[in-house]
Image (cartoon, rainbow, N blue to C red):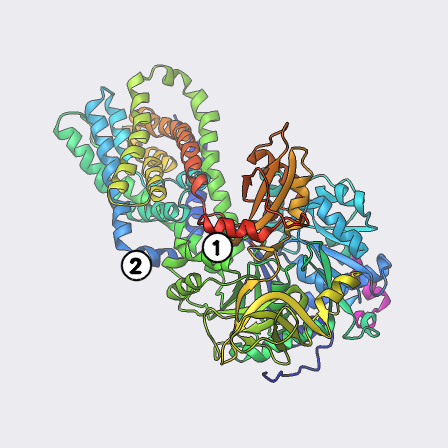
Amino acid sequence: MVGAFEQAILAAMIFVIMLGMGAALTPRDFMLALKKPYGLLVGLGSQYGIMPLIALSLALILPVPDAVKVGIVIMGSMPGGTTSNIFTYFAKGNLALSVLMTVNSTLVGVLAIPFLVITNLAILKAVGAISVVIPASNIVITLVLLLVPVMVGVLLRRWNANVGALVELTGGALGVLFIVLLLVTWVPRNWQFLMNTPVSVFACVILLGWLGFFFGYVFSRLLRFSDRDSQTIAMEIGIQNGPLAIAIVVFTFVGPLQSMQQQVMAVPALYSLFIVLSSTALTIWFRRANAAKEQRIPKALL
Amino acid sequence: MRERKNSPDVRLIGDVARLAAVGYGAKTAYSVVMPNGMYGKLSFEAIDALSDDFAVYLREELGLSAGDRVALQVPNSLTFPIAAFGIAKAGLVLVNTNPLYTGTEMGRQFADAGIRALVIVDMFADKLDEAFAIHPIEHVIIAAVSEKMPRMVSGVIRLVQRYWDQSLPEISRPHHLFADALARGASVRASRGIQAKDYTANIRPDDLAVLQYTGGTTGVAKGAMLSHANLVTNVAQAESCFGGEMRPGEEVVLTALPLYHIFAFTANMLLFHKWGAQNILIPNPRPISNLKRAFENHAITWMTGVNTLFNALNNEFWFTEDPPRSLRGAVAGGMALQAPVAERFKAVTGIDVLEGYGLTETSPIVTFNSRQKFRLGTIGQPMPETEIRLLDAEGREVPPGEPGELAVRGPQVMAGYWNKPDETAATLRNGWLMTGDIATVDPEGFYRIVDRKKDMVLVSGFNVYPNEVEDVLAAHPGVLEAAVIGVPDGAAGEAVCAFVVRRDNQAPGVEQLREHCKAHLTAYKVPKRIEFREQLPKSNVGKILRRDLRAELEKAGG
């Protein structure tokens, strides 16, 4: 369960994380993306094509409760998380590409997320996999609200590069802190609940990440992206915005749906915890490969 | 020879800062930009005032007197211009020192120059013990990379340095902090009404301003004695070459090359500063993506660089996808600019990279390609008042078109090497500086470097002296003898290649030898390639023939 105080903290954290994401951007980044619509389309296609499909398939195949199916569909429809940028940085991947994909998918997410969530839930309902109906309006409102800090971040950076850099740092740090907060507050208080959660749910959240990595990499390799860019895209696809999913669950599953909240929420919460482990493993692997190929500049004049 | 425009206001190096402060006042003179875009900046007025404060501190608080040597060992940061101008204004001699030097290299240079005070960046202060063992220094002043940045920003940088990078060592030696020194200087200056200008009232333009260390021809590092006149004249010469293209007070120049190197020192810190340009200081351009935010956040109009830098930018997608639209000009020096690199840079940015040629001993510019007189692949034409002769082995001028050793005479040529009369006599003959570079000249007067007479290896603009590397290798117990040559190496120009004959009973491997070298040499001097041989080619008097090794490698195809 999430209390009122925690909800407030959560909202504030999401706000700062999105602010930081905005501060990482210049209008120049948008121009670059628009100049290369192919790359933009590939990014969005993989983000909102591959992950929702994986999520839908998992929801259809795995024997998990309805609420978990709803959770996995929401989780799969999320944009890239800011943590993917941090992991890409440590993996010596293409950081600019990662940031660009995160931002683009977040912006487009305002339309894509409600559409995907509603469509996929309708499919599940149609094939008789679930029996609940989720209103879409709450999801849309949450998303629109989240765009405001992104814009504020962009403006902050333009106004003063120092403030921009500080906000960007803070946002990135909070992204990590968020996971820590989850570990120290949510996990202990929901310990009993987690103990009773079937293994299939754990399998579900872990698989979502790894299947995302795998298909993201294969997809971009097929489109002839370089190895390094493909690794970056793989991480971007596999690492979803967990905090955003939690925020959506918290603000959507209210009133009559409140009873479902804890179970739905288990998916993004567990996903966020396990993706850190998965991404760390992948980062170590990619970093080794990339460090060997880095542009070496002699330690002399430069 | 072109005519040089005189600027009577600038007599000494310190005058550059004074004149620029009068002309450009509150405009930003220096911005230091971190990889994530955090920055700190100082205006022309602030640079002038703070360097006055520092001059007062050095003279009044430390009690240094005119002509004393002060070493400056910091990466590009706001400390550099304050300290460098301050040292000059105090009538002291600036000794530029590479922050990446090992403690032993520092100690040797400090001993040779007779350093009395040192300004060193905190990150490398752990090398002080080793340096002090060779030459104790009376006054150590510690500066931070984040010096003079906004408090919040420098706080974050300090936190990251201390806890994340763990790059701030304990400092075992008594020292003063640069920030305190400035504050102290300011209060002394105000309370006693000191005019920093008085310190240089008796300094003449021909007096020593900078000891710029270089290996020269023989391999032992020597201090080239550059006078105030050498440097300010070189600035004036450069102004007459491409000053017409400059918009005073409007330019923003990328300073990714370290200011302790003579190229950036004269071109960026003196020349561009004098024109009222904003210097964008990059503390560490490695990895090259560290420059991304500088290009994004600042409308960079000019840049100075070496082949390595231009080549690296050519290979960064963020640079090639969206090259800086504000860029108007680029200047290359320090090492030969490779034609494919210049061509690719032009294709990306539309900018011709203007190549110049110079040496530490010539403050440094000797020849330059201006946009009006530009020829790719050449080092351009001589600067105003600069004479060049191409000489054969007997010292006679070679026939037109023939290669010969490039000799230079002009107002920018150094007075000699510090305390090295023999070396000076070998290099300077009747005012002519023997560069050791073999060059040709075409009928239009464009010079082209064809080869180096010296055996020196030029790694990314830095001289590596085979003797020094050979000595270190030979000091390893498992090494019988060693020979070092330069081999062509892509963007870095040359790499150090060592041939080693091992002793019978001990057999160090390539990695062990490299570790050994790393412990005694700065990274760029460490051999990139080590080959083991049964014997080395020698002349009949037993001198190892490096040229035979070179020929052997060439025959083997690299």
- Work out whether disc 1 and disc 2 sit on a shared chain: no
Label 2 environment density (alpha carbons within 10 Å; few <14, some 14–19, many ≥20):
few
Q: Which residues are magenta?
A: B184-198
Q: Secondary structure at mark 2?
A: helix
- Residue at the image position 58 percent from the left and 80 percent from the top: B240
Amino acid type, label 1: Ala
B118 on left or right of B554? right
Q: Main secondary structure of the magenta part?
A: helix
Report, in whole angstroms, how far the alpha carbon at label 1 lies from the one at label 2: 30 Å
Q: Residue A214 at x, y = what percent? A: 29, 33
Residue bearing the label numbered 2: A35
Chain letter for mark 2, please: A
Name which residue lies at 63% across and 78% down.
Answer: B387
Query: Which quadrant of the rendered structure holds the N terminus of chain A?
Result: top left
Quadrant of residue A121 within the rendered picture: top left
The one nearer the camera, A282 or A159, is A282
Q: Position of residue A110 (x, y in %)?
A: 29, 46
